């Protein structure tokens, strides 16, 4: 029982952090649209350390997409992109911290431009691919790897379970 409660609490904290970071980033016009640098995507690196990361970033993305006014298909498939990336990060991140961001970057680079093109009518499609890729790479490598290093150094203090 204690283990499930701890998992739920961690997921809730991660989800809350994701929402707050997305909301702040959105205030600067960076969390949505063709050019996206969702700093909150850096939290996907937490998936390497705890399965709560998968739940947290996925639920955080869902809530963020709802409160930032995304279209229903964006809410569904944008959240799915984050879930796929989080699961991949959990798997790949256990092999290499430098590979850990790739699933999140790849899943969002494939799915989000399709949403931008077909749901919002942003053109051209390949511009969306390039800008989403760059934004995700910034979020996951520039912000995510330092987060990974901080958590790695403090893993025992944080009592994170693999």
Image (cartoon, rainbow, N blue to C red):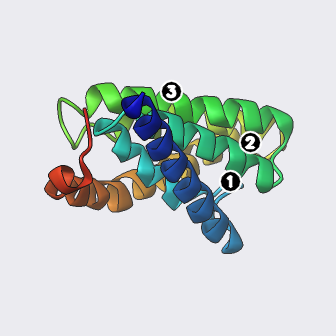
Q: Residue at x 66, y 39 (%)?
A: 113
What residue sits right under mark 2 in the picture? Answer: 116
The crowd level at tag 3 (other Cα within 10 Å; few <14, some 14-19, many 20+) is some
The picture places residue 53, in percent across and down from the top left corner, at 43, 40
- Mark 2 neighbour density, 10 Å: few (under 14) some (14–19) many (20 or more): many
Q: Dot 1 surroundings within 10 Å: few (below 14), some, or many (20 or more)?
A: many
N-term-proximal mark, 2 vs 3: 3
Q: CA distance from mark 1 to mark 3?
A: 20 Å
Of the 4 image quadrants, the one containing the N terminus is top left
**Mark 2 and 1 residues: CB-CB less than 8 Å, in contact?**
yes
Q: Secondary structure at mark 2?
A: helix
Which residue appears at 51% of the width and 31% of the height? 107
Disc 2 from disc 1: Cα separation: 7 Å
* Foreground pick, 86 / 51: 51
Secondary structure type for disc 3:
helix
Marks 3 and 1: in contact by CB < 8 Å?
no
Q: Position of residue 128 (x, y in %)?
A: 64, 46
**Residue matched to label 3:** 84
Cα–Cα gap, marks 2 and 3 = 18 Å
Relative to 76, 81 lies left or right: left
Q: Residue furthest bottom?
A: 28
Q: Nearer the viewer, mark 1 or mark 3?
A: 3
Label 1 or label 3, whichever comes before in sequence order: 1
Say if residue 109 shows up in the picture: no
Vertical arrangement, residue 75 with respect to residue 153, above or below: above
The answer to whether residue 18 shows anywhere in this view is: yes
Q: Dot 1 lies on which element? A: loop
Q: Which mark is residue 34?
A: 1
**Left or right, 32 with reference to 66:** left
Position in image of residue 126 (x %, y %): 62, 41
| Viewer-side residue, 48 vs 29 | 48
């Amino acid at each position: 029982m204690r283990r499930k409660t701890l998992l739920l609490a961690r997921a809730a904290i991660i989800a809350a952090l994701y929402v707050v970071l997305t909301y702040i980033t959105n205030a600067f016009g960076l969390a949505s649209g063709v050019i996206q640098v969702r700093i909150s995507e850096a939290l996907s690196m937490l998936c390497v350390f705890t399965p709560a990361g998968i739940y947290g970033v996925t639920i955080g993305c869902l809530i963020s997409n709802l409160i930032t006014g995304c279209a229903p298909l964006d809410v569904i498939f944008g959240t799915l992109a984050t879930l796929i990336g989080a699961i991949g990060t959990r798997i790949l991140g256990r092999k290499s911290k430098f590979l850990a961001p790739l699933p999140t970057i790849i899943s969002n680079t494939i799915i989000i431009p399709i949403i931008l093109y077909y749901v919002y009518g942003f053109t051209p499609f390949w511009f969306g691919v390039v800008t989403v890729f760059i934004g995700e790479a910034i979020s996951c490598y520039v912000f995510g790897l330092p987060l990974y290093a901080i958590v790695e150094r403090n893993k025992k203090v944080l009592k994170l379970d693999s």
